[in-house]
Image: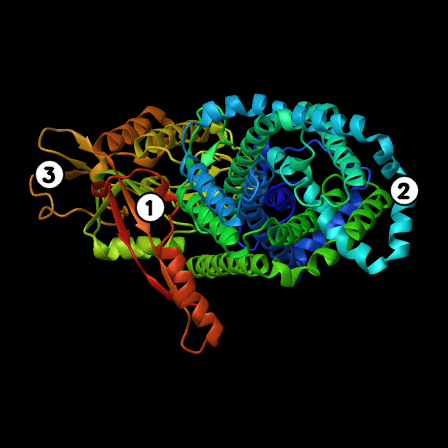
Amino acid sequence: MRGGIFALYSLICRNAKVSLIPNQVHSEKRMSSFRLKLPTPELERSIKVKERLESSLLLKKLLLGLVLYGTSMFISNGVITPAMSVLSAVSGLKVGIRNTSQDVVVMISVALLVILFSLQRYATSKVGFALGPSLLVWFCCLGGIGLYNLSLYGPTAFKAFNPLYIIYYFGRNPFQAWLSLGGCLLCATGSEAIFSNLCYFPVRYVQYMFVLLVLPCLVLAYLGQAAFLIANPKSSEQVFFSSIPSGVFWPVFLVANLAALIASRTMTVAIFQCLKQSIALGCFPRLKIVHTSRKFMAKIYIPVVNWFLLASCLGFIVLFRNIHDVGNAYAIAELGVMIMATVYVTIIMLLIWEFNIVKVLSFFITFLFLELIFFSSALSSVGDGGWALLIFASVLLMIMFIWNYGSKLKYDSEVKQKLSKDLMRKLGPNLGTIRAPGLGLVCSDIVKGVPAIFGHFLTSLPAIHSIIVFVCIRNVPVPVVHQSERFLFQRVCSRSYHMFRCIARYGYKDKKQEHHSVFERLLIEGLEKYIQREAVELSLQSEDDVDSDEEPPTPMKIITAPNGSLYSLDVPLLADYAPSTQVIPEASCSTPLHDPVLDYAQNLELELAFIKQSKQSGAVYLIDNPIIKARKDSWFFKKLMINYFFAFLRNNCRRAIMLMSIPHSNMMQVRMTSYV
C-alpha cells in the first residue's frame, strides 16, 4: 500500500479516539463520511480492541510513532525512487555509447531531475493525458524484449518457477542468499512508483491492468534477462540495456527515460498527497498547497516540498554516484513502509473490518515474517548507502514528532485558558462594551468554550461586533466532507448575546484555499439554516450529544436613533448594561413592553434580518495566535524542542485560517504567551 499510512491511521482515528490531538467531536459521527456499512460478526472483540486503544495512552503514542516512522520512510522512498530510476535509465548510455564515463551519466541525471521538478507544477492535464500511452508503450517494450530474449536464448529461464531452486540456493550458501534478498525488492522500482498515484482511477481498472498487462510484461522482462544472463554470464552490468536488440536500442532507451521521469513525477505527487493527509491530522507543519487540476483533487503541488525533494535527490545522486548504493537505501525505505502498512491493516482488520481471528493472525504472521526477513537483509547494507537514508528519515521523523508534540501542548494550553460562560456574564456589565455593526469572526483552535483571546479583546476594545462567531477550523479523519455538513453551529450564552460557535470541518482531501468572501458567504448561509432549524427544534443535535450553551433569557434594551429606527446592532454586550447618553448623545433608550428575546424566537425574519444587516457592515477576523514556551523548570530537551525547534516550525508555516486570502484591513491578530 503506497502512501496509505495516514489513510489507514485516519480510518482508525474515526472509529476510535486514539488521536493525541482531538480532531473531531462526538456529534461529527452524524456526518455521512463516518457512516460505514461494515459486517459485525466479531463485534464484541472489535469493541474490546477499541476500548483498549482508547484507554491506553501508551498504545496511542505507539500508533502515532509507527505512523510517523512509516511516513518518514515513505518520503525517503520518494527521494530515492527518482534518483534511482533516472540514474539507472541514463546509465544505458554506457551500453549505447562505449567509454561513457559515470560523470556524464551523473550530470545528465541531475539535469533531467532539475527539469522534472521545475515543471512539476505545470502542464498537469497534458502530462496526465500522455501518461497512459507512454506507460503502455513502456510495458509493451518490456514484454517484447523479454519474448525476444527467450526466443533467442531458449526457455531455460522458466526453470526459475520451480520452488526447489530457492531451497538449493539457500542450502549452498545461506548467508550469501540471505544478503541477496534485499536486492529482490529492486524489481519493484518504477512499476510500484507508477501505481502510487492512481487514486483517481477505479480500483477495478487498476486491478485488471495489473493482472493483464503490468505483471505479464514484468515477468517476461525478468525471464528474458535471466535467459540473457545464462547465455552471457559475464554481462552482469546493465543487463537490461545489454539485452536490447541493437536495431531498437535508442527508441527503447528514450522510452525507458520517459518512464523513469513519469515514475518520478507520480511518486512526487504521491508524497504531496501523503503530506497533505499528515498536515490534516496535525502531524506535519502546514504548508502552501496548490491544486493544479480542476477535475482531480489528487493533483496538488507543494512548492516547499518540491524543492526540498529536488535538493535531496540531487544530494543522493552526487553522494553515491551509482545505482548500487542508491538501491541499498531504496530497499530499506520500501520495506519500512511495507511493515507499517501491515501493522495498520492488521489493526483495521480487528477494529473495523471485524475479520475472523484466524484470518487476522494468518495475514499478520505471514506478511510480517516475510517482510522482517527482507528488512533484515536490507539492513545489512547500511554501510553501503543505507546510512544516508536512515539519517534522512530520522530528520523527517524528528520534525514530525516535534510538531505533533508542540501542537498538543499548545492545544492543551488553550483548553486550560478558555473562558467560562459564568465569567462572560460577569465581565460584560462591568466593561461597558458597545456592540458595533458588523460580523466578528474569532478564530481559534478550541471546539468548546470561549477562547481566552476573546477576554483580551473585551478588556482592551471599547466596542465589539454585533454578531460574534467563534470559528474553529478542524480537520476530520475522512477524505471529503460534504458541503452541507461543512459547518456545525451552536449558540454561546443566551440569544441576546448574538454569539455563536462554528466548527468548519474539512477532510484531508478537501480544498481549503477558499477566498475569504466565499468562506463568509458559506458560513452565513450555514448560520441562517441553523437558526431556521433552531426555530423548529431549538437544538442542532439531540440532548445526549450536545453540550448546550443556552442560558436563560435576560432583558435587553434597544437603542432608538433620531430617525426613529431601531438598532439592535448597537445594544451593549450584556443586557445588564444600559447605554448612557454620553456614548450616544442623540439616541434615546426605549424598553419594549415584552421581552425581545421572545420576539426572536417567535419571529424568525427579525433575526435573519439582523444577520443580513451585520453581513452588509462587513466581517473582521479576530485571530488568536498564541505562543508557547517551556517553563523555566522544564527539562533541557523540552526547552530545546519547544522554545527553538517548534517555534521555528510554527513561525515558518501557515495557519489553517491563513489559507484564505484575507485582506489585512479585515484581520486583527493578537499573540498571547503561555508557559507549558
Secondary structure beneath dot 1 equals strand
Residue situated furthest bottom in the rendering: 633
Instruction: Look at label 2 and name its amino acid.
Output: Pro
Q: Which residue is mark 3?
A: 587
Instruction: Look at label 1 and name its amino acid.
Output: Val
Mark 1 vs mark 2, foreground winner is: 2
Q: Which residue is mark 1?
A: 442
Q: Position of residue 53 (x, y in %)?
A: 68, 54
Based on the displayed image, in which of its 4 quarters is residue 121 positioned?
top left
Residue 163 numbered mark, or none: 2
Residue for point 30% across, 58% down: 671
Residue for point 75% across, 42% down: 349
Give the mark nearest the N terminus, 1 or 3: 1
Query: Residues under labels 1 and 3: Cα distance?
Result: 29 Å
Give the crowd class for mark 2: few <14, some 14-19, many >=20 residues within 10 Å.
few
Instruction: Look at label 3 and name its amino acid.
Output: Ala
User: Could you say which is closer to the camera, residue 449 or residue 642?
Assistant: 642
